[in-house]
Image: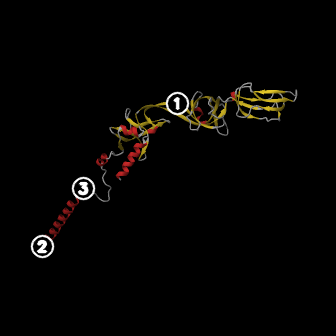
Amino acid sequence: MKNVFRKAIFGVLGLGLLVGAALYFKAGPGSQNPGRAPAYNKVSEAADGHEGDSAQMSDARVAAAGMSLETVKPATLNDVLVLNGIIRENQENLVQVTPRFPGIVRSIQKRIGDNVRKDELMARIESNQSLTAYDLKAPIDGTVIDRQVSLGEYASEQKPAFTIANLSSVWVDLSVYSKDLQRVRVGDRVEIDLEDGMPPVTGQISYLAPIGSSETQSAVARAVVPNSTGRLRPGLFVRGRVALSNRRAAIAVKVTALQTLDDKPVVFVREGERLEARSVKTGDRDKEHVEILEGLSTGELYVAENSFVVKAEIGKSEAEHE
C-alpha cells in the first residue's frame, strides 16, 4: 500500500515539472515582468540619433540651428556691485539768471527747453529806477530748464528769472548702502543702464560723498558722464554696475552655455558627432562667464550659444521613447 502511495506522489511531481517546463519555453527567456518598466535600449536610440543625454548633430546642423562651439578656457571674472541711481544736472555747468534791477517784464525771448548761446537775449525788463528797458542775457551756452517770470509781471533782483544748464555732461548719482561703502573707490569703472533698450553707457566714479543720508543709510557715489546726444535726461532713474575687482578663473564657459537637466546644471560638449550633456559644478560668475569647478577640462569644445536647441532635441527624443 505504501509503495502505491509513494508512486502516486512522484507521478504528480513529475507532471508538475513537465507543465512548468512547457510554460517556460513557450514564454521564452526574454519575457519581462509586467510590473517592471522595459529595459533601456541604447541600440534603438542610437539608430534614431540619440543616446542617453546626448544628441547626434553634425557641424552643419549646429551652424544651421544658430549654435556656436567654443573652447573651454580660462576667463577673467568681474566682481560687480549693482546700484540704483538718478541722473542730475551737472551743478558745475548750471546757472541761475537773475535780473540786475527790479522791474516789469516787457518781452520774453526764451522758454523752457530752448537752447541758448552765451550772451543771447532772453528777456527785456523795464527798470523801476530808470524806467528804461535793459537786456537780460544768457551767461553760458546751455538749455533753459526753468523759468520763473511771465510777460508783464514784476521781476525781482532777488529771484532767478531763468535757470540754464549745459547738459553736454551730467551727474549720475548712485546710492551706496553702508555695507558696501568700503568696496567702492574713486576711479572705479561704472556701466550705466538707462533701461531704454539701448546699450549702457560707461563712466568712472569721480566722487564719494563724505556724508551719508540718515533716511536711506546710504551715501552718493557720483560719475560725471558725457551727454552730447542728450540721451541722459536729468530726473530719470538708472541702474549702475560698478566693476570692483577682477579674478582669473582657470576653467570657464559662457553663461549662455548652461542648461538644466534633471535639476542639475549641464554643459553640452562635443564628443565626435554627438553633443553630450556633461554635469558640472559651477563657481563664481559675472554677466558673461561662469567658473566651472568640476565636469570640464580645458580645450574641450562646448555649445556656447543657443544651447537650448540641444536640450530641446534631447527632450524630444525622450518623449518619443516613452
- Front position in the image: 22 or 15: 22
Give neighbour class at mark 2: few <14, some 14-19, many 20+ (Cα, 10 Å): few
Q: Is residue 167 left or right of residue 293?
A: right
Amino acid type, mark 3: Gly
Amino acid type, mark 2: Val
Q: Which residue is mark 1?
A: 245
Q: Position of residue 236 (x, y in %)?
A: 64, 37
- Asked which secondary structure carries label 1, the reply is strand
Of pointers 1 and 3, the one earlier in the residue sequence = 3
Q: Is residue 315 left or right of residue 192?
A: left
Q: Which residue lies most toward the bottom here?
A: 1
Q: Position of residue 97 (x, y in %)?
A: 76, 29
Amino acid type, mark 1: Ser
- Front position in the image: 281 or 106: 106
- Asked which secondary structure carries label 3, the reply is loop
Q: Which residue lies most toward the top here?
A: 119
Q: Which residue is mark 3?
A: 30
- What's the residue at 30%, 46% (across, down)? 47
**Mark number for residue 4?**
2
- Asked which secondary structure carries label 2, the reply is helix
- Cβ–Cβ under 8 Å for marks 1 and 2: no
As drawn, 315 above or below 155: below
Which quadrant is home to the N terminus?
Answer: bottom left
| Discs 1/3, front | 3
